[in-house]
Amino acid sequence: MTNTMQAAQINHYHQNQLVIQPTSLPRLQANDVLVKIMAASINPLDLKIMAGGLKLILPYQMPLTLGNDFAGEVVAVGPNVTQFKVGDAVYGRPRKNRIGTFAEYLAVNAEDIALKPQNLDYQQAAALPLVGLTSYQALHDLMDLHPGQKVLIQGGAGGIGTLAIQLAKSMGAFVATTASRKNFELVTALGADRVIDYHTENFAEVLSDYDAVFDTRGGHTLEQAFRVVKPGGHVVSISGLPTAQFAKDYGLPRWKQALFGLASHRLMRLARQSQATYHFLFMWPSGQELQLLTNLVERQTLRPLIDRVFTFDHLNQALDYSRKGHARGKIVINIGER
């Protein structure tokens, strides 16, 4: 193994194109495994980071290697690692201060990964970690969704939506989702009980008395979610504004807590008026929760949906395709084979 690798990086924020260039092999810490990355997936988070949209939460140093989830093969383990060995096929989502899966190798804390589901190849497995963990943490950890409850999942045909629908159904929930007419058959096949054409219907006018809403859009769509939930319900968003409580829990300084509190004031007021709770979700890595998802995949209860696969050399074309917002499922980057 050489001391350098190819990685896709930005040198400053607002850089629309990634540059694939040589960089040093990541250093292996005591609790790490070194993974040869076979495949990674594109997430909206990558585009937000490139645009500088998360600087207040994550002030990255440049140059920065992008990429937030992966599947690959363990090629080295740190001295404290006992649960994985060289040759293991694994997948995961690295910690936010250690991202960089658009590269040939990644050093990742062993607690943040799990063995790859045996019935998935590397490309399929790479499509799962970030969207799977995000969906699980929204539906299980924050909403505490129970059988018979009703949940609205925005954007059912997207990367998050396709996983969240399946996960919510596995929890026994009644699932409504929004989609364009051309995607009705897809989301219904995934388990959606009620599908709303967002081109012709306003979900807030046709749905009511829901236990929870999983928002992936933000803005006005998020504000309307509070018209749908019943008292005691939950609105969880990955695209809305962070709250003061989130900033405090995340360990941000008080001035940022005050700033987020001011920015999210309208959302918190809507939550109080509807007697519901509002959570901004910034998902966290968890090898244990990934293992739960692995179990569902191997029982064929959950399956990742891939829209397109690009080679590493065509990563920027994949990002351009992602920006259009029309992908059905995930966009995957094949890194191990080019």
Image (tube, rainbow, N blue to C red):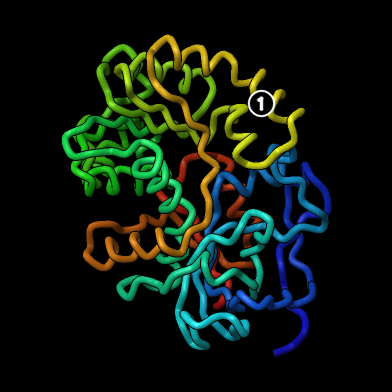
Q: Quadrant of the N terminus?
A: bottom right
Rendered view: 225 above or below 330: above
Rendered view: 316 above or below 149: below
Rendered view: 223 above or below 54: above
* Residue closest to the eye, 308 or 128: 128
| Position of residue 90 in the picture relative to residue 100 (left or right) | left
Q: Position of residue 149 (x, y in %)?
A: 21, 32
Q: Which residue is mark 1?
A: 260
Q: Residues within 10 Å of mark 1 (few under 14, many from 20)?
A: many
> Residue 114 is drawn in which quadrant?
bottom left
Q: Position of residue 124 (x, y in %)?
A: 40, 65
| Position of residue 124 in the picture relative to residue 99 (left or right) | left
Rendered view: 34 above or below 308: below
Residue 328 visible from this viewpoint: no
The residue under the point 36% across, 55% down is 305
Please tell me whether mark 1 sits on a helix, a strand or a loop: helix
The residue under the point 45% across, 53% down is 330
The residue under the point 82% across, 55% down is 62
Q: Position of residue 171 (x, y in %)?
A: 23, 46
> Residue 52 is drawn in which quadrant?
top right
The residue under the point 51% across, 38% down is 281
| Position of residue 61 in the picture relative to residue 244 (left or right) | right
The type of residue carrying mark 1 is Phe
| Position of residue 144 in the picture relative to residue 85 (left or right) | left
User: How many circles with numbers are drawn on the protein?
Assistant: 1
Residue 263 visible from this viewpoint: yes
Q: Quadrant of the C terminus?
A: bottom right
Q: Position of residue 214 (x, y in %)?
A: 39, 33
